[in-house]
Amino acid sequence: MSELPSAPPIRLLGSNISYFTGKMENYFRLKHIPYQLESMQFPATRKLLERELGLMQMPAVVLPDGRFMTDTTKMIEWFEEQYPQYPILPPDPLQRFLCHLLEDWADEWWWRPAMHYRWHYGEGARFASYHLANELLGSIPLPGWLKRLYLQQRQRSGYTTGDGISRATVVGVESDVAQLWQQLEDMLSRQPYLLGERPSLADIAFAGPFFRHFALDPVPLELLRQQAPSVLEWVVRLWNSRMDNMSGEWPECIPEGVTALLEHMGRGYLPYLSANVEAVRAGATRFSVEVDSVRYEGARYSRYRVWCLQRLREHFDALPTNAKSAAEALLKTTGCWEPLWRDRDLPLLEGQEQELPFRGDTKMVGVNESLLKR
Ligand SMILES: N[C@@H](CCC(=O)N[C@@H](CS)C(=O)NCC(=O)O)C(=O)O
């Protein structure tokens, strides 16, 4: 008997040491959605994605029908509609809202420290630049040392020293990371996933900074082994979890530990988001801000993150009345409420990000692309 040809799998274009590619892989695995990871090849992939999506961003997904997609947040939302069995969002609206908050924080705040740990230390920069030069830049006819040098400079000037991290900031950034690890260690030494017994969107989002960065790059990996072994165990547990095998229930109430995370987010990320709004409104592509006792000097503004703030507000506005009051009370006691609403009108471009996940308008930041553009 001949077998029916199986449907071509979903293609995930990215890198196997990339933050957002790792987030998407954790999602596909958890949902048991078959996919095939393909390393992007520059400069060809850049041209392809600019044509198909309007921008080059990692990862991209190509559906079996040939459509291209970008942005992990909107892609996951779309896949959840297509694969509604075993949802990664809890049924309780307040818990769902918390997942969206935590996802945004994981995506947009922990990116900078993750890049810092990779590119600041020689050990990390050597590993990552060697890996990426081979994985992504194989078709560029230049010597390996030059590609590695280029990658280190590109990533530092785009995402670390060029995004507000100076010598004086390093201690503050690393202690911010240490606080997060301690908070997660407290939670994950008591329960297998962030919301309790079942993995959720919050776990998928935190796979971004942890799976391909903190738990992979040599310097943070050793720190994680020593300081937060339960978090390290969670990284692998999540990678090896499947939603259709879960017997645990969604939690009855907000799990212990979430309040500390929200307080942390309210001290650092939300005030930063609001400073970013001011910078975008003023057209100041660089801005300086002190949040949670750390001063970021010359951080890049991000139009995309204005849209992120708008989305968080929309998620809040969409809550049913009871959940809305509970969310408001929780946001107020954790210091998140005021910065969430500080700027009433947000300086969004007309129709900004409305075509996601099938077309993007703005990237997180613009970095120097000379080598990859040829
Ligand atoms: N919000 C986007 C962010 C994706 C993103 O920023 N990816 C990084 C690499 S992991 C990237 O493409 N950076 C652009 C660049 O370096 O040119 C998502 O969720 O997919």
Image (cartoon, rainbow, N blue to C red):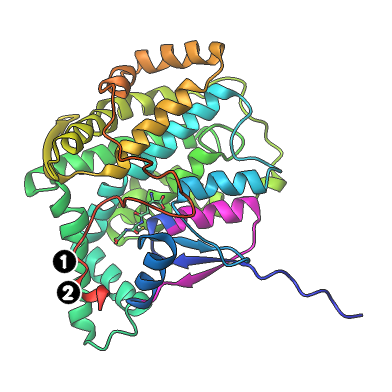
Q: Residue type at mark 2: give it.
A: Leu
- Image point (23%, 66%), residue name: 125
- Quarter holding the N terminus is bottom right
Left or right: where does residue 180 sit relative to residue 88? left
Residue 347: image location, x then y, percent: 26, 33
First to last magenta residue range: 21-41
Query: CB of residue at label 1: within 8 Å of ligand 1?
Result: no
Q: Secondary structure at mark 1?
A: helix
Which residue in the structure is indicated by mark 2?
149
- Is 291 located above or below residue 243 in the figure? above
Checking the image for residue 349, the label placed there is none
Q: Quadrant of the C terminus?
A: bottom left
Q: CA distance from mark 2 to mark 1?
A: 6 Å
Q: Is 256 located above or below residue 8 in the figure? A: above
Residue at 55% across, 51% down:
27
- The answer, for residue 294, to whether it is visible in the render is no
Residue wearing tag 1: 153
Quarter where residue 87 is shown:
top right
Mark 1 residue crowding within 10 angstroms, few (<14) / some (14–19) / many (20+): some
Q: Quadrant of residue 6?
A: bottom right
